[in-house]
Image (cartoon, rainbow, N blue to C red):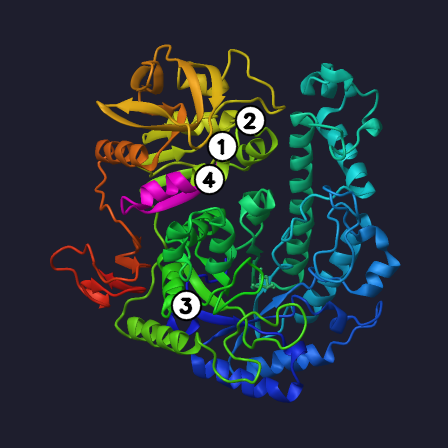
Amino acid sequence: MPQLLNKAPSMLGVCYYPEHWPESWWAEDARRMRALGLAYVRIAEFAWSRIEPEPDVFDWGWLDRAVATLGAAGLKVVMCTPTATPPKWLVDAHPEILPVDPATGRTRGFGSRRHTDFSSPAWFEAAMRISTAVAARYGDNAHVVGWQTDNELCCHDTALSASPAARDGFRAWLRGQYADIGALNAAWGNVFWSMEYRDFDAIELPVGAVTETSPAHRMAWRRYASDAVVRFHAEMVAIIRAHSPGRWVTHNFIPMPETGVDNHALAAPLDFASYDNYPLGRADLALAGAPADDFRPWMRTGHPDMQGLLFDQTRGLTGRPFWVMEQQPGPVNWARHNPRPAPGMVRLWSWEAFAHGAAVVSYFRWRQVPFAQEQMHAGLLRPDSSEAEAWPEIAQLAGELAALEQAGQDLAEPGRAPVAMIVDIESQWLSDIERQGAGYDYNGVVAQWYGAVRGLGLDVDFVAAGADLAGYALVLAPALAMPGPDVVARLRDTPALVLIGPRSGAKTRDVTIPEGLAPGPLRALLPMRVLAVETLRADCPGEIRRDCDAFESRAWRESIDAGDCTVLATYEDGTPAMVRNGRVHYLATLTDDAFLAALLTDLCAEAGMTVTPVTGGLRLRRRGDLTFAINYGDEPVLAPAPDGAVFVLGGRTVGARDLAVWC
Ligand code: GAL
């Protein structure tokens, strides 16, 4: 395994596009990168048309010289496969590689990026051919220290395609899964609405129908599409490994909520995962519906839980230190509104990433480009090469990292958090496919539960369903829609307290109601039954009562027969809303934040954990012996550091958009 932990001189990087600039600029650019304290430079992920300007005619000269120039300045090169942007000649020769938009049925054309179909055999062949060429050319180049596969796989809604290739691939995949068409018909319940098939080749993709298609059909399509991406990526990683021994391989992931792809499976062949951190763009989109007063405090910072959540999810993909491969340095160009970061935020986001286990933070991009699609997107330099707003913050950060290292404070391997949160792509798929209530969104539930734990000052590890739960004091599963036997066994075997949220064990693998009712196989741990489900408008909540306190029961409410479980909370009519059996708790409804905070405080106390409640913009995170207090707020706050704490950065008063670090 290549070395993953980095020391101060090697913790910062930048994304660079030598093909966008005159060659005469490269050496000076490289010199200035080093002078700023940057160690890594990621290149070539969109450079296919320059690498192979015509079919089978390769022009390596410019890229060889770019790598040599960057390397000569002391930069370590992260090389990419350029498969996010296949050139026009390939599309002209093989128009069948273009994906088809499932919503409109239209072929998505050339002219931007990601215009490819993971099911297309011609695309697979072309992508692996160019990957092999690049890997063979730079695999043992002394300046190339590692690889990024592709770029943001499935970005721009490209996991699903409704092409003929996808239909054919889906049919073959279904044949592999069910073998017999009668078995598929029975499993999906196709007798309903006369949807029975006589052959696998009669099955279409679940698009373009008059009204809702079968949930089993859509679930199978999601699984198929996710598998196709995983297969494509695994092959690319294998090619790189074959040509580039001793180098690491990573990918800059789009989070699962946005792509609907199983990122845990996608990450399996990688050394570590990377994430592209655009807090303001994401906040603008995620908080689009929030009232102005709730949005304004975070307009220039991003919400204080959102970056942490995505850093933790990225670390959880491999359980190892991760990279921020692209960090927003100023306004982006792609959200609905694109404000400037508050002064100090570029440094603070970077420190926050390190607190959550980042090995490297790399900025997007070196110089703002004066042409084409992203010309309104900030870089570290303006188009005239003058230093843009983030520059002094990165210079400060580089100095702080160096000082920390000199003081003997290397950032340690991120240890195990006390709390595990199980994230489950199948629960996300079910929440998309069978909406049932506009107020139930799996990822919203994960974010709410995460925020509740972070509000108690605790660190969280995200783990995949079925992962080892050893060493955790508290295990949270916001939903486990269709848990397999491995998941049930892990929950049975952990000595931790377990809290399972509503909609768990709700369905079988083929999206049917389990025999004996929900929570299906979880009844081995929770001898109870879900009798009925109702969903409510956001402004018409019910009540949940616990220990004489009343809170809101919202959006998704299950009526349950508590069976042999102990009732811990009730609805307004006195029927059970939360039960417990041994260490395992089942919460049958979504609730307000106050309920979760009260419940988790009690569970943490029972599990022997000390909580440090934080409010406003303050968040805490530990790494090794160090505790980080990160203040997103616009007022100074007091660090909740114990007496005798030794501050290695900042002090007891944490300034606005600033941090303190102590041991
Ligand atoms: C990322 C992408 C980059 C660039 C950037 C702009 O998602 O990987 O290529 O487009 O967004 O913010």
Q: For the magenta stretch, what is the residue range? A: 447-464
Report if the CB atoms under discs 4 and 1 are less than 8 Å apart: yes
* Real-space Cα separation, disc 2 to disc 1, in angstroms: 8 Å
Residue 444: assigned label: 4
- 637 vs 171, left or right, is left
Residue located beneath label 3 in the image: 346
Which-is-in-front pick, marks 4 and 2? 2
**What kind of residue is marked 2?**
Gln
**What kind of residue is marked 3?**
Val
Q: Is residue 277 visible?
A: no
Residue located beneath label 1 in the image: 440
Residue 655 drawn at (x, y percent): 25, 65
Residue 94, located in which quarter of the rendered image? bottom right
Residue at the (39%, 78%) spot, across then down: 392
Which-is-in-front pick, marks 2 and 3? 2
* Real-space Cα separation, disc 4 to disc 3, in angstroms: 26 Å
Report if the CB atoms under discs 2 and 1 are less than 8 Å apart: yes
Residue located beneath label 2 in the image: 436
Residue 103 drawn at (x, y percent): 72, 42
Residue at the (29%, 52%) spot, across then down: 616
**What kind of residue is marked 1?**
Tyr
| Element at label 3 | helix
| Element at label 4 | helix
Residue 219, located in which quarter of the rendered image? top right
Residue 270 drawn at (x, y percent): 56, 53
